[in-house]
Amino acid sequence: MKIRFWGTRGSLPVALTAPQVLQKIAKALVAASGQRFETTEQALSFARELPFDVGQTFGGHSSCVELEAAPPTGPHHDYVLCDLGSGLRTFGSSVLARHGARGTNTFHIFISHVHWDHIMGFPLFAPAYMAGNRICLYGSMPNLKPPCADSMARRRFRWISLNSAQRWSLSPSPPAKPGRSPGTP
């Protein structure tokens, strides 16, 4: 199983600032002192070995996690995601790169809660607007459609029509066992 973190930041998506990027570049150049790279691949190989604080970053997009039990192998794939944060847009672009615009994929999305940072990526999730794709939302709320549909409302995104979203399947989480609150095993 693979787990991909398309977004981990809380509340507000934030990119690195220009000074932060320059600081990382300067640290990488110091680490590369005396090295010579003939190809971009050689430079990338060196960069991949840099310490995390120099060659990597975290944060950026808000909550969106992909759980992959098996890699996509054909024109149809079932995806499992947790949350619809801003990382969902990047995930959607990745799906389009893998399958093209004609995919017939099913997206099983488990929503932890419907605060804005956990659903803000939904209006920008391109596969939701493509015929053949299916979106299945799961969560502890009895009806997830109103907050998700509201995130796509014309007053927020004038270029989106709610009628363009493909098949929706909205399912609450399974009932809790006696003596336990919803969402706990």
Image: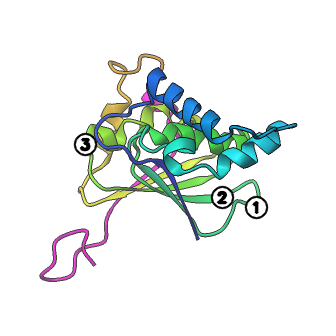
Vertical comparison of 21 with 87: above or below: above
Distance of mark 1 from mark 3, alpha carbons?
34 Å
The answer to whether 167 is drawn above or below residue 159 in the figure is: below
Mark 2 or 3, nearer chain start: 2
Provide the residue designation for mark 2: 77
Q: Nearer the viewer, mark 2 or mark 3?
A: 3
> Residue at (75%, 53%) from the top-left corner?
75
Image coordinates of residue 134 in percent, x first then y, are: 55, 50
Q: Is residue 67 left or right of residue 185?
A: right
Farthest bottom residue? 178
Nearer to me, 179 or 169: 179
* Secondary structure state at the residue bearing disc 2: loop
Viewed as shown, does residue 143 lie left or right of 1? Answer: left
Identify the mark at residue 73; answer none if there is no mark: 1
Q: Residue at x 43, y 39 (%)?
A: 61
Q: Position of residue 77 (x, y in %)?
A: 65, 58
Q: Is residue 104 visible?
A: no
- Quarter of the image with the N terminus is bottom right
What stretch of residues is rendered in magenta? 161-185
Separation of residues labelled 1 and 2 (CA atoms): 8 Å
Q: Which residue is mark 3?
A: 115
Q: Position of residue 157 (x, y in %)?
A: 40, 21
Q: For the residue labelled by badge 3, is the local secondary structure a helix, a strand or a loop?
A: loop
**Image height of 93 relative to 104, above or below:** above
Q: Quadrant of the C terminus?
A: bottom left
Instruction: Tell me if residue 170 is in the magenta stretch.
Output: yes
Q: Are marks 1 and 2 in contact (CB under 8 Å)?
A: yes
Question: Is residue 168 visible in this depiction of the protein?
Answer: yes
Residue at position x 48%, y 45% from top?
53
**Of all residues shown, which one is farthest toward the front?**
34
The color scheme shown is rainbow
Q: Amino acid at mark 3?
A: His
